[in-house]
Image (spheres, rainbow, N blue to C red):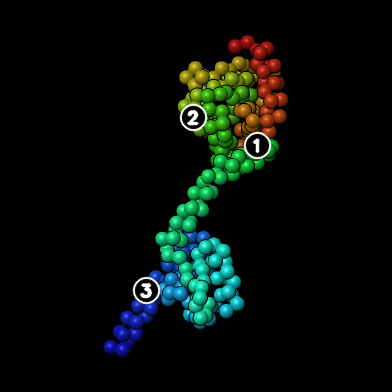
Amino acid sequence: MLSKLLTHLVKIIYTIINKIMDTLNTIKSLGLSDKEARVYIMILEHGPSSPQEISHISGLKRPTVYVILGELMKQGIASFIPYSKKKMYRVISPDELFEKVENKIKAVKEKLPEIKSLQKSELEKPYTLFFDGVEGIKQIMDYKLEEIQNDEVLHFMSTTSKKTIDLFEGFKEYNKELRDKNISVRGITPSDPILKTYRKEDKEFGRQVKEVNLQEYKSNVSIEMGKTWVKIVDLYNLQGIIIQNETITKALKQIFEMVYSRLEK
């Protein structure tokens, strides 16, 4: 009988502790530190309290309590009651606390365009990314396609190998995505017999490709140029890099245009 009572008592204690912890975590999620949340909950439960009472009930040292109360007052969450015999502190209701958080979120949202503009300027700085393996090649394919929607990419295509044939399905998905985003492709390709199968879909995917004799141009590397980036992929070794640099992109595009304009269809 006694053991059952003890077991029941332990369950009740655990339930209370879990409830307290849930409440504490909820208050902390609204932006309060652990100690700030503990003091807030303590005053909320016990009503206006003195620093001595808060220290006694919360287990926090009195100097710490004074610091926390100061922080809560700065945030407009706590205030002291004037004209009382001893300094007593009260806190705002949970509804008022939540309203404060909502107002902060609203203020941040209003500043969001300004914050995003800072992020954009940071991303526009030149940088280089390195990739490896089949998954890495797929990541290169997907990089910044939204940037060139309704625009075009220029492409120095590579010769094929067993590994590139295995990637053809991935290329098909990539081409579908280009088509769906209304991105056209102009390319220069070696006259690789295996590539001719791939090129049967040129018209369907809006590709304008010119061939170069395989003896003159037999590159193992694919080079693709977007608006501000260059994707360089070694399809034999399944390695690639992305160069996010507008100056380099423009230079390579000029080289492409010089070659493309001199080739027959």
Q: Which residue is denoted by mark 1 in the rendering?
A: 124
- Does 211 sit above or below residue 81? above
How far apart are the alpha carbons under marks 2 and 3?
A: 53 Å
Residue 129 visible, this angle: no
Q: Say which residue appears at 61% left-offset and 24% top-offset.
A: 155
Q: Which residue is denoted by mark 2 in the rendering?
A: 177
Image quarter (top left, top right, bottom left or bottom right) of the C terminus: top right
* Mark closer to the chain start, 3 or 1: 3
Name the quadrant containing residue 99.
bottom left
- Does 29 sit above or below residue 61? above
Q: Residue 50 at x, y = what percent?
A: 51, 78
Q: Locate residue 75 relative to residue 8 in the image: left or right.
A: right
Tag 3: amino acid: Thr
Looking at the rendered structure, the secondary structure element under dot 2 is helix
Q: Which residue is denoted by mark 3 in the rendering?
A: 15
Tag 2: amino acid: Glu
Q: Residue furthest top?
A: 264
- Does 261 sit above or below residue 166? above
Contact between labelled residues 3 and 2, with CB atoms less than 8 Å apart: no
Dot 2 crowding, Cα within 10 Å, few <14, some 14–19, many 20+:
some
How far apart are the alpha carbons under marks 1 and 2?
A: 24 Å
* Mark closer to the chain start, 1 or 2: 1
Q: Residue 100 at x, y = what percent?
A: 48, 57
